[in-house]
Image (spheres, helix red, strand yellow):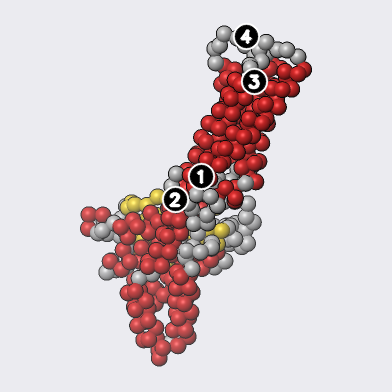
Amino acid sequence: MAAPVPDGIWLPDLCRLPRLLTMLGLAQLTVVLVMLVPIATPPWDGAQFVSASGYALWLALSVSVLLCAGRKRLSRLPMRLGAAAALGLALGVAVIASAVVHGLFASIAADPALPGFGRFVGGSAAAVALLTAIALRYFYVIDRWQAQVGAHARAEADALQARIRPHFLFNSMNMIATLLRRDPEVAERAVLDLSDLFRAALGAGGGTSTLADEVSLAEQYLSIEQLRLGDRLQLHWDKGDDLPWSMPMPRLVLQPLLENAVLHGISRLPEGGTIDVVLAARDGVLEIAVSNPSLPPSDAPAQGAGHAQASIAHRLGYAFGPRASMRYGWNAGRYACTIRVPVADFAPAHTGSGRP
């Protein structure tokens, strides 16, 4: 086993219903396999199968409840010792339960098919210990993998703070300085937009955002870039009806795509161009598409070297599961990136166009 996790609770949590059902399913599967094994004794009838199933499920439930109740105490022990103690508890439950069951069956009637006490108790205890060890190891690996995926996702979100590059800050401050005398109101709005943008970047690693917040932040970023690039940067927003504006989203999933579109697309073209942003929700899927004119792949480096897209795709996969997807590449002189994520049951807070 690997090193303990930071919170110190390394023993898998069997209190959760899906894992309890897995333990019960593993016990029932064992009974089915035993029934299907060709042996010299007569095959089980329905009553014997039901009795064996009830016995196996009872053992699995007892072991799961005991390990659930003792999880914190066992996790205080060194990992190897705690794992041995957990298996020892499972073994003890199996020994006691099998001894009781064997005694009950033996006292009711003499059944020639009933194994001897030692074989019955020893076999039950060995099977329970082996299956418990396999289940705990499996759940432990799953827990560690999920923790690593979560840590990776948080680290990539934190790294997105660097996506708002220093040169963008310097260019924005210089632009604001030139606007102070000519148009103080525009300069003030630019300062507020810049403040919101960096506040969002500093909080990229914690909590979640919403679709409305992500779109608002993207509009603030683009308004600053429009002041800098002037007529070279044109925008076209297409916000579909009934968008789930309150839908939770990872922070900074839209702004980095637009920053790539400006930095690696519009700013490299002397004549500039138009960035198209399309948002649509249909058939239980939210689709966000960003496209911009760009130099062909042979004349320009990969748009943002794919780092922002890979990071966003990873975080979307962690947040929404395998149904989340992200596609990007060149097509007919334009670079396009499309995000698709499943929509939960969120009532639209706003319909139509305009900032939510």
x, y percent for residue 56: 64, 27
The residues bearing labels 1 and 4 have C-alpha atoms spaced at a distance of 43 Å
| Nearest-to-viewer mark from 2 and 1 | 1
Nearest to the observer: residue 54 or residue 248: 54
Residue located beneath label 1 in the image: 81
Nearest to the observer: residue 84 or residue 189: 84
* Image marks 1 and 4: residues in contact by CB distance under 8 Å: no
Instruction: Indicate left or right for 222 with 282 as reference.
Output: left
Q: Count all numbered tags in the image, as a single digit.
A: 4
- Residue type of the residue flagged with mark 2: Ala
Residue located beneath label 2 in the image: 3
Residue located beneath label 3 in the image: 117
x, y percent for residue 202: 46, 70
The residues bearing labels 2 and 3 have C-alpha atoms spaced at a distance of 40 Å
The residues bearing labels 4 and 3 have C-alpha atoms spaced at a distance of 20 Å
Question: Of the residues under marks 2 and 3, which one precedes in the sequence?
Answer: 2
Estimate how packed mark 4 is, as few (under 14), some (14 to 19) or many (20 or more) residues with alpha carbons within 10 Å.
few
Estimate how packed mark 2 is, as few (under 14), some (14 to 19) or many (20 or more) residues with alpha carbons within 10 Å.
few
Question: Of the residues under marks 1 and 3, which one precedes in the sequence?
Answer: 1
Q: Quadrant of the C terminus?
A: bottom right
- Residue type of the residue flagged with mark 1: Leu
Residue 42: which disc? 4
Instruction: Indicate left or right for 311 with 5 as reference.
Output: left
The residues bearing labels 1 and 3 have C-alpha atoms spaced at a distance of 30 Å
Image quarter for residue 308? bottom left
Q: Secondary structure at mark 1?
A: helix
* Image marks 4 and 3: residues in contact by CB distance under 8 Å: no
- Residue type of the residue flagged with mark 4: Pro
Residue at left offset 40%, top offset 91%: 181
| Nearest-to-viewer mark from 1 and 4 | 1
Residue at left offset 60%, top offset 50%: 73
- Residue type of the residue flagged with mark 3: Phe
